[in-house]
Amino acid sequence: MTIESGSWGRAARGCVTLTGVLHLVVAGALAGQGPGAPYGEASAVPIQFRAAAMEARRLVHAFMAERGIPGTSVAVGVDGRIVWSEGFGYADVELGVPVTPLTKFRGGSTSKPMTQAAASLLKEEGRMDFDVPVQRYVPSFPEKGHVITPRHLMAHTSGIRHYPPEGNEFHSAKHYEDIVDALEIFENDPLLFEPGTAESYSTYGANLLGAAVQGAAGEDFLTVLHEYVFAPLGMLSTVGDHTDRIILHRTGFYERTNRRPHYHLRQSSWGDGTGLGELLNAPYVDNSNKWAGGGLLTTPEDLVRFGSAHLRPGFLTPESLAEILTPGRIGNGEVQNRGLNWSIETDDEGRRVISHGGGGVGSNSSLRVYLEEGVVVAIQANLSQSNPGVLSEPIAELFISALD
């Protein structure tokens, strides 16, 4: 039996974890679940941020009740230090296990910028070139009549398709021993457009990038991520979502019926979106087909550690950071609202923000980084299509205001 704990230890690069002593506190009724939903409360929030944390708790409770979310976890970092981290509700509804800051959720597409970081670090070592045919690193990938480069994959301009809006690809139960083998899902499909001429978000493109990272490094992809990203940043709770392993603190995964149609949900749960619907265990999936594009388990604390590594050079060189965080251009000269595997925006207050969301079966995640303010917010929930990212901005505003 293999056990992956992610470890209890928690310190790297000046990040301080605030799990502290966990208290089980009775919260208000969680809609659709009945009374008595507990939450794990992290102690030792710095005085400067206690009022912000108190108001953020209110927002989280209201959001969970409105959407019938079983469990949520939130972490906030300021200048590389985690100042608030807290779990709410249930990680396992049937057994009454509370969410704590240790609870691991499916990170969904938040794995894409982690794959990007590994690729950029390989480039710094001279082991990867972003502007050569991807076949240099993945020789088995078929030629498409146009050159596809790693940079195309990073910028979502490769022309490789995403999941179909209907179908069961998102709910794949097939196990793959090697991420190169999983390319069979899409490798023989035609491109949507000539690479570089348009933009279309693609998890499959990210999976091909993961295969290229593996080829460039000469090691298994998850090993590369651990050695280049997780271990250096102290992301000790971030692991592959292995279906056959005992992984400590892994949450249960849930969905609700009568949801609006979406490929994240089984079709029997599709409806008109009215009411909360019935809470169900999410379908079984095996995410070994997409470690790079959306197959990792992680925690908000680890997401904050990762996001904080992009606030200033150190983990990455100034050149790598600039390359990742500069908006790209497609063939007609149009400027993208993304760099390399990060969304880039300027908010209503004129603040530069990078972000990435993630949707998985029985999960949703959000990571938001305020580059000048040094504030990083990560939120995860164990319900499909719950969209906790809508809380990221209001929670960030609370903590940015506390800096004044």
Image (spheres, rainbow, N blue to C red):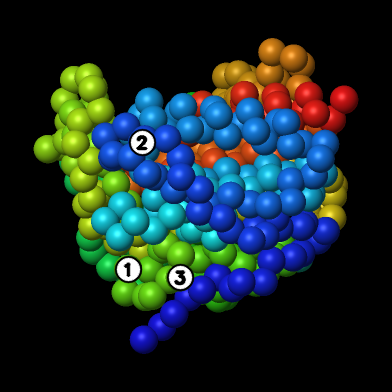
**How far is the residue under mark 3 from the one under mark 1?**
13 Å
Q: Which mark is residue 243?
A: 1
Residue 401 placement (x, y as % from top left): 78, 24
The part of the image, by quadrant, that contains residue 217 is bottom right
Q: Amino acid at mark 2?
A: Leu
Side (left or right) of 360 relative to 402: left
Q: Amino acid at mark 3?
A: Leu
Residue 330 placement (x, y as % from top left): 58, 26
Residue shown at 34% from the left, 56% from the top: 96
Q: Amino acid at mark 1?
A: Thr
In this rendering, which labeled residue sits more in front, label 2 or label 3?
2
In this rendering, which labeled residue sits more in front, label 1 or label 2?
2
Mark 3 element type: loop
Q: Which residue is mark 2?
A: 30
Q: Which residue is mark 3?
A: 248
Residue shown at 77% from the left, 57% from the top: 15
Whether the residues at callouts 2 and 3 have beta carbons within 8 Å, the answer is no
Side (left or right) of 74 relative to 282: right
In this rendering, which labeled residue sits more in front, label 3 or label 1?
3
> Is tag 2's residue or tag 3's residue first in the polypeptide sequence?
2
Mark 2 element type: loop
The quadrant in which the C terminus is found is: top right
